[in-house]
Image (tube, rainbow, N blue to C red):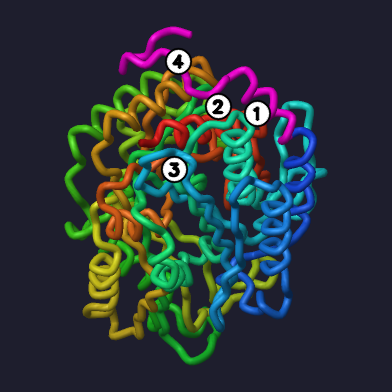
Amino acid sequence: MSSSSTGATQPLLDAAAAKQQIDAKWDDDIVHRLTEYIRIPAKSPAFDPDWAKHGYIEQVVTNAAAWVEAQKVPGLKLEIVQAEGRTPLIFFEVASTKPGATKTALMYGHLDKQPEFTGWHEGLGPWTPKYDADGKLWGRGAADDGYAVYAATTALLELSRQKMPHPRIVGIIEACEESGSPDLLPYIDMLRPRLGDVGLVVCLDSGAGSYDQLWLTTNLRGMASGTLRVEVLTQGVHSGDASGMVPGSFRILRRVLDRLEDSATGRLLPAVLHCDIPAERRAQAEVTAKALGDALFDAYPWAHYPQGGNEQTVLSPCTSGTEALLARTWQPTLTITGAEGLPALKDAGNVLRPYTSLKLSLRLPPLVDGAVAMREVKRVLEADPPYQAKVTFDCHDSATGWNAPAMQPWFTEALEVASQAFFNAPCGYIGQGGTIPLMGQLSEGFPTSQMMVCGVLGPGSNAHGPNEFLHVPYAKKLTACVAEVIARMP
C-alpha cells in the first residue's frame, strides 16, 4: 500500500481478513435482513400520522434490535427506549477494551423512511426489494438509512474478531429522522449521563461523491419548510364572469414568491439566508470537483440532452464543478414540493379557483440559524399582501445546518489509512445539501468531537425519490473503514 499524504502507511486491522469477513457477513446475512426491511412501509411520523397504530416503525426497530443482540458482540448491552408519545429508539453500549481510553465513540443511524413517491421503474417499487447483479439493492430505506445499524454492528464484530482494542462505544438508532428528528433531542437529554465524553461521532446517514473512495461529509445545509397559502374567494367562480376583475390566487402567489426568490437565477433574496463560505470549504470543493469531473453532473436524471451541448452547460445554472458543489451545499435554495387548490388536468374546468397553496422547502447554508431564517421568510411573504388578499405562511419546522470542527491529526490519518486500505484511494471531502439535525445538536454538546459523517448515498442512489438503491459493494468497504477509524481513536 502506498504512503498517504499524512505519512501513515499501515492499517491497524488485518485489511484482507476484515474485507473477507465483512463481505461474507453482508452477503450471507445483511442483504437478506435489509431485503425484509424494505418490505415494511415504516414511514416517518410526518408521513404517517397513525404510525403507532400501524406498528411498522415498532416492527423495524424490534427487528433491528433483535439482530444486534443476536450478533453477541462482547460486552454489548442494548435496550429499546420509548417515552410516552414518542417514536422508539435503540440505545446500545459497549465497554472500552483499550487501556487508558477516556473518550466515547457514538454511532448513529435511523430506521424510519420517506414516503413512496411516484416514478419507480417497471419491476421496482418502494416496498418491493430487488437485488441485482451489480450489487444494488433497490427499494425504500435501505440506503437511507436502514443499513446503518447493521454496518455499525458488523464493524464492532470485526474489531472483536481481530481482538482490536477500542474505546467505549455507544449507539443511537432513532425512528423519526425523516420528520426532522423531533424526538431525538429529548432522548439525547435523557441519555446524556450515559453517553460519556464523546470524542468521535460516526454518523452513517450521509452521502458519497463516488463509489471509488471513502468520503467524509464536511458540512450539511439546514432547512426550513412551511405552507404558503393565498386566498382570494370563499368558493370558485366562473372564470369568464370574474377574471379580470378578481385577481387569480396563483398570480398573487407568484408575486409573493418573487420577494423570496429571483426566478431568473434561483437566488434567494433576503440577506439573512446567506453566509460567507469558509476558505477551507472552497479549497476542498475545488479538489473534489477535479476528482469527480463530469460525474458530478451525470449523477442526476436530466430530462433533456440538447444536441450540440450537454446537461452541464445547458440544464444546470452552474458552469463549473466547484460552483456546482458550493451551490448545492453553501447556497440557500427554494423548492416547491407540493400544492393544493389545483385540480388534476382532467378535472380542470373554466373556474377561477378560490385559493392556491404551496409547500415550500428551503435549504439553508450551514452557518445560517434555521429559526431566524424561518421568521424572516414568514415576514417577507406575509407583509403588505397584493390586493389585500389573505396571504399566510404556516411554518412547519426548521433546522440549523452544520459545519465540521477542525480535524485532529489522528482523525485525518485514520480516514486516509482506512480509505487507502479498503478503496486503494485517498479519502475525499465533500459537503452535502441535506440536513441531519443530530449533527448540530452533538456539535453543541461535544464541540471538540471528531465527526465521521459519511454514508452510501452516492451517484444515482436517489434517496427520497423513486428508484432508490443501496450500493452494497460500497457499504461493505464503508463498514470496514468504520472499524479501522474506531480502532485508531485514542
Three-letter residue code for mark 4: Gln
Q: Secondary structure at mark 2?
A: loop
Q: Who's the residue at 36% across and 41% down the image?
A: 100
Would residue 59 be visible to someone looking at this image?
A: yes
Decide: few, some or many residues near mark 1? Use Cα within 10 Å; few <14, some 14-19, many ≥20.
some
| Badge number at residue 134 | none
Q: What's the distance in space between the residues labelled 1 and 2, CA to CA?
A: 8 Å
Front of the two marks 2 and 4: 4
Residue visible at 31% across and 47% down? 449
Q: Which residue is mark 4?
A: 10
For the residue labelled by badge 4, is the local secondary structure a helix, a strand or a loop?
A: loop
Residue 244, can we see it? no
Specify which label sits upstream in the sequence, 4 or 1.
4
Per the image, is 18 magenta? yes
Spatial CA distance of label 4 from label 1 is 23 Å
The residue tagged 1 is 473
Cα distance between the residues tagged 3 and 4: 20 Å
Query: Which mark is nearer the camera, 2 or 3?
Result: 3
Q: Amino acid at mark 3?
A: Pro
Q: Amino acid at mark 1?
A: Pro
Q: Which residues are magenta?
A: 1-26
Q: Which residue is mark 2?
A: 211
Residue 471 falls in image quadrant: top right
Q: Which mark is nearer the camera, 3 or 4? A: 3
Q: Please say if 394 is above or below 466.
A: below
480 vs 316, left or right, is right
- Residue at the outermost bottom position: 234
